[in-house]
Each structure stands twice: as structure tokens, then as C-alpha cells.
Image: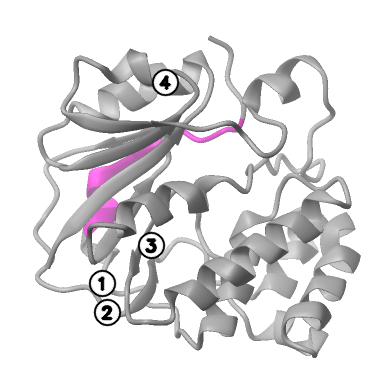
Amino acid sequence: MAVCFCTLAIHAPYRNRARTLCANPACAPWIVLTDEPDDFADLPVRAICHKATGPMAIDYLHRLAPTGSDRGAAAAYHDKRFAVQAALQEHDTAIFFDADSRVDDLPHIDAFPPGLAVLPVLCNSIAAHLETWGPWRLPAFTELARDLVGDPAILHAARWCHEACYAVTKDGNEARFFGAWEHGADFLQRRGIASGEGGVMGLAAVCAGWTIDDNVLAPLLPFIHHQGGGPKEA
């Protein structure tokens, strides 16, 4: 099965971290969506110029208020889907890593299930996740669930997805998945919400008819080190 790794690297701190990530021989080939493709010219990656659809890390450091709750929830920027879509143009499976991840030698995975696979890190429903992390976003997600699925009760069944590492494998329903993801991202951004990508992914998986798999990537968990913590200074 043809597998491609991908990441999103906008602004200098994330470009620098992505260079280290992509230089690891444990993962190849790579697609990087970035605002400065020339920064990756010396690496064996396909760097695609990408203009962010919304506020990015530097905006939260210098202009905008945090988007999560006072417990420390950080922003997600709703643009990771473009990197995954680019990787799936020529490959069966796209594995996304946050640019601020480090990976050791990864164990081999023989086959990926169709649809969406995530790390077994967050196991809550969207509703349960929002009770703790950014509960002010619940009204918007309630509207979004009604808009996408027709019933906001789906928030108690649909999964909140860990966004730092996941895999998407084509099965013919990926257009429905990405269409719902795009709709959800636009829906939230029009309401000034630049976070919640994990919840949008969970609703998009429902729209695609996918059951989210949290087993296939589990062997990778000890080998992935995610710095996290939201926006970073250069």
C-alpha cells in the first residue's frame, strides 16, 4: 500500500521544526504545505506553497487572544486537511504529523483500514471534550452538528479526534469526508472560531460513514514525541 507522510509548516518556528521532522529517514515520502517552499529545497520532500485560510501561530502570539478555555486549550487552524488531500492525490494512505513532532524509527504497519485512523490519545465524544476544553464553543458545534447531520445529539456519539497524528486511507468516501471537513471549518471560522479541528474531523467521519479506528496507529504511540503547547516564538 502506498503511504505518504505530510505536515503543515507555516511561519519560521514550524518550518524549522518540520525540517527536522522531514529529515528523519524513518518516514518517507513527505509532502509539506508551507508559506516558504524554498526552505525545504535541500530536503527530499515535495513542498507546496500554501496560504493559510485563517489566523496562524504568529497571530496568537502577537495579536489575538487564546482560542481555548482557561485550562490551556490551544488553537488548531483548520488547514491540515489540505496537506492530507495533497498526499492522497498519488497515494492510498496519508499520515499527518504536526510539524512540532519528533519520530523515532517507526514500526511497520502492514495495512491501514479504510477511512480515518487516530492515535488512542483522546477517547471522548465531542460533547464530553467540550465540557472541559473550550465549552464556549459548544453552541457553535451544536449548530454545526444540526447543519451537517441533522441532529445535535450526534455530539454525544461522534468522536473528538487527536489532531497531532492520524491517517486517512481512501475507500471512495473521502470526498464526503473532506467536503464535510471544509464545510465545518468554514462554518466555525465564519463565527470567529479558529480551533476545534478535532471535533470537525469527528463529524466529517460520521458524514463519510467511517468508524474511527484507534488500534492501527497504537503501535506508533511510543515512537512519537509531540511538543505541542500551541503557538511558538521563532
The residue carrying pointer 2 sits among few (fewer than 14), some (14 to 19) or many (20 or more) residues within 10 Å by Cα, namely some
Q: Residue at x 51, y 47 (%)?
A: 80
Q: Nearer the viewer, mark 4 or mark 1?
A: 4
Which residue matches tag 2?
Answer: 113
Specify which label sits upstream in the sequence, 3 or 2. Answer: 2
Asked if residue 160 shows in the view, the reply is: no
- Quadrant of the image containing the N terminus: bottom left
Which residue matches tag 4?
Answer: 15
Q: How many marks?
A: 4
Q: Are the residues flagged by discs 1 and 2 in contact, CB closer than 8 Å?
A: yes
* Left or right: 15, with 183 as reference point: left
Q: Which mark is residue 119?
A: 3
Q: Quadrant of residue 206?
A: bottom right
For the residues labelled 1 and 2, the Cα–Cα distance comes to: 8 Å
The residue carrying pointer 1 sits among few (fewer than 14), some (14 to 19) or many (20 or more) residues within 10 Å by Cα, namely some
Specify which label sits upstream in the sequence, 4 or 3. Answer: 4
Q: Which mark is residue 216?
A: 1
Specify which label sits upstream in the sequence, 3 or 1. Answer: 3
